[in-house]
Image (spheres, rainbow, N blue to C red):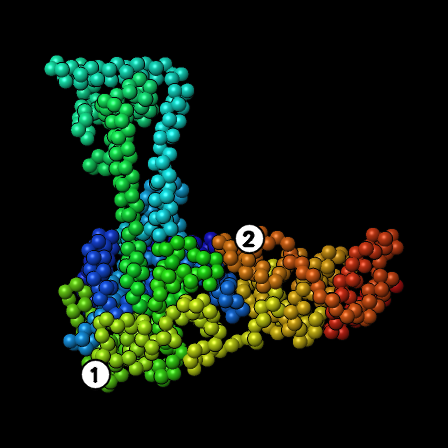
Amino acid sequence: MKYRHHRTRMALSRVLSRPFSTTSTSTQPPQSAAFHLKHVTKSNFASALADLRRLVRSADFVAIDLEMTGVTSAPWRESFEFDRSDVRYLKVKDSAEKFAVIQFGVCPFIWDPSNHCFLAHPHNFYVFPRQELPVDGPSYEFLCQTTSIDFLARYQFDFNACIHEGISYLSRGQEDNALRRLNMAYEDELSYTWCSSKEVKDKSLNRMADVLFTERIKIRFSEWCDGLLRDRSGGFPLQWTSDNSKQQFKTIFFKMRPALNLTGFTSRQLRLIKLVINEHFKDLTYVRVNSENNCSQVLVVYTETKDDRDFIMKEVKHEQLRGEENKIKAAIGFRHVIDLLSSEKKLIVGHNCFLDIAHVYSKFLGPLPLTAEEFVSSVNKYFPHIIDTKILLNTNFSLQQRMRKPRTSLSAAFASLCPQIALSSKSTRLALQQCVQVEVQVDDLRSSNWNSGADHEAGYDAFMTGCIFAQACCHLGIDFKLHLPSENLAHNEKLDKFINRLYLSWTNGDIIDFSTGNKITEPLGTMNFKKQYPKILFENIIVIWGFPSKLKAREIRECISKVFGPTSVTSVYHLDETALFVQFSKAGFVSDFLVLKETLEASDSLLFVLHPLAKLLEGGNTCAATYEIYKEICSSPISKVLFADQAEAVGIKSKTEVVEPKVAVQSQEHENFIEEYEGNNVPKSAEKSKQGMVHNVKEVILSGHYKITDSLYTAEGNQIRANNT
């Protein structure tokens, strides 16, 4: 972990050393690139958002793409063939919670009926999780994966624009929490004020300096009040006798009432002044307000009656509340874009976008739910129409035929389905391959001819995603020339079996329906996913970690097969260098293995040394558990690089999760072996102390019905017995 973080710091140092370029944040792309892309930072966010609202409302669909600081927080958190769907979701959840979104591409596509083409409006938003509100607690933290940072740097990602000019944001959950804390603070303000005054009275006035200060303040306020009364009756107003008094006490009007503006006092002195006002002046009110330049201003306001005083306090309180609410609203930032996409209910198009949607939820909506079912149900409320172009390409036979290669990565699909757009060529041959023409417009600049844009820049990737979708729709038989502006593309029957179906995992083709929450294990079309392993039965799987590092998967398989039989283990798969999965042919072998392992480790007799599992258990650090414990470890927010360290950090300290073994037929062969071992190897002096342990070992081995298949094991036992007699 330390090495990875060191490399991350080096990568960040390298990319941040490039000078910050203002052209990166302008709406005009660099001169070396002819593709028009609107870069949006905090300096032009307000105007860009206003334009985007108009474009999204008119859009037929909106393509999105995200750039993140990493994907997996540890090697064992990658998606494996042996991962169950609920575990796959937990790994996606961990990624979305730990890494930051630093660029967000949004590209509305609007059909232009007069020119029979789509007009794309690519926006590239730089996003940075800057803490805008003065709240308690640490600032935001996120992980950076070295490979991801280095990858972005190689594609000229502008980290300076992201960090210095990136748009901050609040999720809906964060906004709700901030408003709730704000309202609670103002509701408790009066009681807090009373407690603060009492504390000052009880503790502060024990100091002579405080006593003298409060007496002088009482005199000053009395003189000021008397001066106000004389002025009202035609007398002469109060004249301060020193320049210092003029600087610290300035008479102004606050809400049509005379008031003193207090400046130059320490926070302790202000607390004492507040105490004096509350204790000795019923016609004066102490208030703290924000001035026009947003600085705190302390006033002592003259109020003739208690009702007038209460009215002033209530009005000041409401103004402060509105001011703080406005600060919270201003901190929403980039989430306004997400709210726009959600409120307009447009068709959202992504490419292999399950992780992207998880990031959108985690960053801009609220904490991710604990299960995939809860997640998809909640997402569907905000975004009822999502389509994944990777699903389209992999599950439709006609689209697969048009792909020159079976690869369905974003760049490969773009080159295959949109060659004229990708190469910006007017070739007749390429034009025949393209069903739909796409033009680009940024502000007032419209173009149908450009050089290739910057891959892995979120705005351009969103553009590519939208182009792929437009061509795919054409190949599916959707004629945009007949498309009416009032029609919702998401309700087109030709797209019905693709809407809201996303890959939970591309590894084995698991698809989840965001409309129903159902999982689809078989592909929708003709795409066949290569299975590297036999059918996976999760109840037959154990996870083993902490074993000697010298052991290979083949050796571990042999150790276990010697005990349970040559066909007992169907597959072994490494999570990392410290852990692996073992799938048994029968579910009963799981509990049998765990009980046997625990029993052998509890024994210090020669039986342990002779047993085939001794090689696996050597060192005393080997742990094993069921698949449910693996899921528990994956659900932890902790992420250690090695799985063995992760299990320890999570608190899985027991070396074996004990499971009640199933009843099995006893083996007379093993019983005879144990009896012979007792008679020949246990010294008489120790026979009594060892009797209970050996008896327990015998019971467990008998109940487990283990068959030792290695003849070498029997030969070694006979040799040791011969040496002892």
**Residue 296 appears in the rendering:** no
Is 505 situated left or right of 149 in this image?
right
Q: Please give the residue where the numbered disc 2 appears in the rendered image.
A: 650
Q: Position of residue 53 (x, y in %)?
A: 23, 60
**Rendered-image quadrant of the C terminus:** bottom right
Q: Which residue is depicted at the point 28% across and 28% down?
A: 310
Q: Dots 1 and 2: beta carbons under 8 Å? A: no
Q: In the structure shown, which secondary structural element does the residue marked by tag 1 occupy?
A: loop
Q: Amino acid at mark 1?
A: Ser
Mark 2: few, some, or many residues within 10 Å (few <14, many ≥20)? some
Q: Earlier in the sequence, mark 1 or mark 2?
A: 1
Is residue 2 shown left or right of residue 610? left
Residue reaching furthest to the left: 234
| Residue at 62% in and 61% down | 625
Q: Residue at x 18, y 75 (%)?
A: 113
- Left or right, 89 with reference to 102: right
Q: Position of residue 404 (x, y in %)?
A: 34, 82
Q: Is residue 141 left or right of residue 591?
A: left
C-alpha separation, residue under disc 1 versus residue under disc 2: 60 Å
Residue 371 visible (yes or no): yes
Q: Residues within 10 Å of mark 1 (few under 14, many from 20)?
A: few
Against 626, residue 183 (above or below) is: above
**In this orientation, which residue lies closer to the viewer: 189 or 124?**
189
Amino acid type, label 2:
Val
Q: Position of residue 479 (x, y in %)?
A: 25, 80
**Where, by quadrant of the figure, is residue 551 drawn?**
bottom right
Q: Which residue is mark 1?
A: 427
Indicate the position of residue 558 as horizontal and vertical percent values.
66, 71
Asked if residue 387 is positioned above or below residue 302 in the image, the reply reads below
